[in-house]
Amino acid sequence: MLPTTITHDFVKGLPKAELHLHLEGTLEPELKLALAQRNRIDIGQGTIEEIKRSYRFDSLSSFLQVYYPAMNVLQQEEDFYQLAMAYLHKAREHNVRYVELFFDPQAHTSRGIAFATVIDGYHRAVRESPALGVESALVMCFLRDMSAQSAADTLEQALPYREQILGIGLDSDENGNPPGKFKEVFEKARQAGFHLTMHCDIDQHNSIGNIRQALLDIQVDRLDHGTNIVEDQELVAYVRDKGIGLTCCPVSNGFVGDMKGNEILQLLRAGVKVTVNSDDPAYFQSYVSDDMFALAQSYSMTPAEMVQLARNSFEVSWLPADRKAAYLRQITDYVDAW
Ligand code: ADE
Ligand code: ZN
């Protein structure tokens, strides 16, 4: 039976998928310090408290200015593996049964780390994840503030690993870097058989224009964030009718202004397949159940709506139909047993 009110325990126990999770954003201060010591990297901070104090963001770009330099501590294949495994343990704790893991190869290759080092480490964790009770897959994101040529080169590097990468995404600073800049490389990725998604971050310059490009020109399968779509009801009807998912991240949104809870719930109630995710949980100190519970605490929503968010997360995942059905049954069983 559904509970009468939404508790953190209920949300944490709900079987769920996470579809908007940056592996590099799961680097907790403890692991950052340990890797800095192991690889003899000076990160300019010596204690957990100092690292945490540097996590003061009020915009996407101020977050990215802290985020990229920290990645220097990731040097060896083992480091990438350890990072991914640490997240997967967290995922299990939050009853994430399936996760599509974003990773940013250019943030590493641009500082001299081999593509193979990154993917070999991450994919070892993906292979081991079912033993933890969490299925996982990799989604390779291009950095949109780098050139379209760099994205094309990265796609070439990824092709020998085609079977290890499920989809392609686009992240980093949206300002001045609209989806259309990457039309050609996304077309190539589609032809190579990858699923496609893209960040359309909140309240960007020309957010709605970027959302239109991503949906209509690039024809992505999903949108990351994308809540500014409420500015155009025709586009809302488009994603609803096509079953295109939006992967929203209320806590990370809250850091740069507004959790966008009204928009998330408005879209949910309009029948759009919105999902709630953690984005960069180590930086925003919120794992996916915390994001879902934060939404319920800050906005008025029902337990049935919370369950619908969890159902959506499997429905708009890139799992095969039989796996989706199996996970959806797990949600039904969980609610029945409550
Ligand atoms: N990289 C990591 N998190 C991101 C976000 N929320 N937006 C854009 N790029 C990102
Ligand atoms: Zn993101």
Image (cartoon, grey):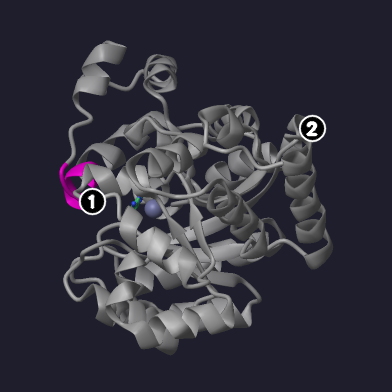
Residue drawn 31% across and 82% down?
A: 232
Q: Please, what is the three-letter code of the amino acid marked with disc 1?
A: Asp
Q: Please, what is the three-letter code of the amino acid marked with disc 2?
A: Ala
Q: Is residue 244 above or below residue 137?
A: below
Labels 2, 1: front one: 1
Residue drawn 64% across and 46% down?
A: 16
Query: Which element type, helix, strand or loop, lies under badge 2?
Result: helix
Q: In the image, is residue 62 part of the stretch drawn in magenta?
A: yes
Q: Check disc 2 and report the residue beneath it.
A: 131
Front residue of 314 and 264: 264
Mark 2–mark 1 CB contact (< 8 Å): no
Of all residues shown, which one is farthest toward the front? 4
In the picture, measured across the screen, residue 178 lies left or right of residue 102, that is: left
Front residue of 287 and 10: 10
Let me know if residue 81 appears in the view: no
**Image x and y of residue 250, in percent:** 36, 48
**Image x and y of residue 336, in percent:** 78, 42
**Image x and y of residue 318, in percent:** 66, 64
In the picture, measured across the screen, residue 45 lies left or right of residue 288, that is: left
Residue 258: which numbered mark, if any?
A: 1
Q: Quadrant of residue 254?
A: top left
Image quadrant in which the N terminus is located: top right
Front residue of 47 and 210: 210
Query: Which element type, helix, strand or loop, lies under badge 1?
Result: loop
In the image, the segment drawn in magenta is 58-64
Crowd tier of the residue under label 1, counting other residues whose Cα lies within 10 Å: few below 14, some 14–19, many 20 or above:
some
